[in-house]
Image: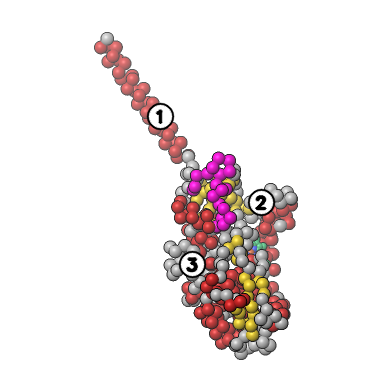
Amino acid sequence: MVLIYLLLLPISITILVVITVSRFLTTSAASKHRSPPLPPGPKPWPIIGNLPHLGKQAHISLQRFSQLYGPLISLRLGSQLLVVASSPAAASEILRTHDRLLSARYVPTVVPYDTVELDRKAIVWASSCSNDQWKAFRAMFRNQIFSAKAIESQAAVRERKVAQMVEFLEGKLGEELFSAGTDTNTATIEWAMTELIRNKGAMEKLREELMAELSPPLLGKSQIDESAACRLPYLNAIVKETLRLHPPGPLLLPHRASESCEVMGYTVPEGAQIVVNVWAISRDPTVWEDDPTSFKPERFIGSEVDFRGQDFELLPFGAGRRMCPGVPLATRQIPLVLAALVRNFDWCLPDGEDPAEMDMSEKFGITLQKEQPLLLVPNGSSL
Ligand code: HEM
């Protein structure tokens, strides 16, 4: 009996060792091939996922989730996975490091054309942002429509239009006027005027700059030289500060992962929708130390931070291959209109309303707008 036992013991030990070693090898091989987890995020409900968590102000809800779960989070919108980047480092990973794989476009099924036709005709609905057709569109924007030469050659037309706007407003002195629009430029001008009415010091400083810099070459009262206006440091700081606090596209336009890839130690799977919460980044106190929710154009005076896609703390136009091609036009039009409005009129709220009491609520939609449209009264300028 003892002999049998002694004979079997080495065999059993050998079998045990073989099983243990082979198990160890299999698990370590599997863990090597297992992809990292999805970014963390709030627990989804069955079927509808996190849809009820988003509410009407998605950019604000997503900011709260990023404060809880980190700079890269994921949520489920029904069956669709949504990945949200909410820090400059996460934005840089999405829009720079993995730009090629994460710049495809999510085309909603309600758009009544097939993908091939959309790719051929419509840049903002093109499903892929790396094919030849899309590159040709972008090259046309860069080299023709928004080239420095084209922008300069149209300056006189814009100056004339702005002079007409001023003449129109001169006929309305003392009357109540609505200022509201849905596009990115008008939304920016509306927010800038709102902030200037609330921040008298900034309005005064801007008026002084306009008086000092624009008065001498002024021909007619209402005519403003666009290229002179867009070089004014304080005016440009106001435009930057407005776009920081009120980016018209708070989440940019959704991107789509054309292939699975690893971002900040997490997996962003193929087909995931990706947004960058530039609104949250712009108000992050760890990024913007000096009272980030206050309107302080001075923070940009003497600062190198710009919105041209290199500084990931300020991304109103996005960055990378899908960055807004309209930047050269927007950065001419917005300062020109603001300069004309402030140079030619004193503005006040109707019925002696107190600017400190203004409703600053936002309406989340195609562009982030003022929920209550701005209502201002133009008066003759004291300049
Ligand atoms: C304050 C003004 C503006 C802001 C804040 C703005 C912002 C943006 C943003 C955030 C995107 C999406 C970037 C992305 O998908 O990652 C975009 C795309 C685009 N913008 Fe603008 N934009 C402005 C003005 C303009 C103007 C004036 C034009 C042209 C007249 C323009 C034309 C476009 C086009 C064609 C695209 C799509 C580009 C593509 O997907 O390849 N934008 N813009």
- Does residue 228 appear to the left or right of 110 in the view shown? left
The alpha-carbon separation of the residues under discs 3 and 2 comes to 34 Å
The alpha-carbon separation of the residues under discs 1 and 2 comes to 48 Å
Residue 171, by quadrant, is bottom right
Amino acid type, residue under disc 3 in the picture? Thr
Q: Residues within 10 Å of mark 2 (few under 14, many from 20)?
A: some
Please provide percent x and percent y for residue 70.
45, 53
- Residue drawn at (66%, 65%) of the image: 182
Please provide percent x and percent y for residue 346.
61, 82
Asked if the magenta segment contains residue 54, the reply would be yes
Amino acid type, residue under disc 1 in the picture? Ser
**Of the pair 231 and 244, the residue shown nearer to us:** 244
Q: Quadrant of the C terminus?
A: bottom right
Ligand 1 near label 1 (Cβ, under 8 Å)? no
Judged from this view, the residue extending furthest toward the top is 1
**Of the pair 226 and 97, the residue shown nearer to us:** 226
Q: Determine which of the numbered discs, if any, sits on residue 107 in the image.
A: 2
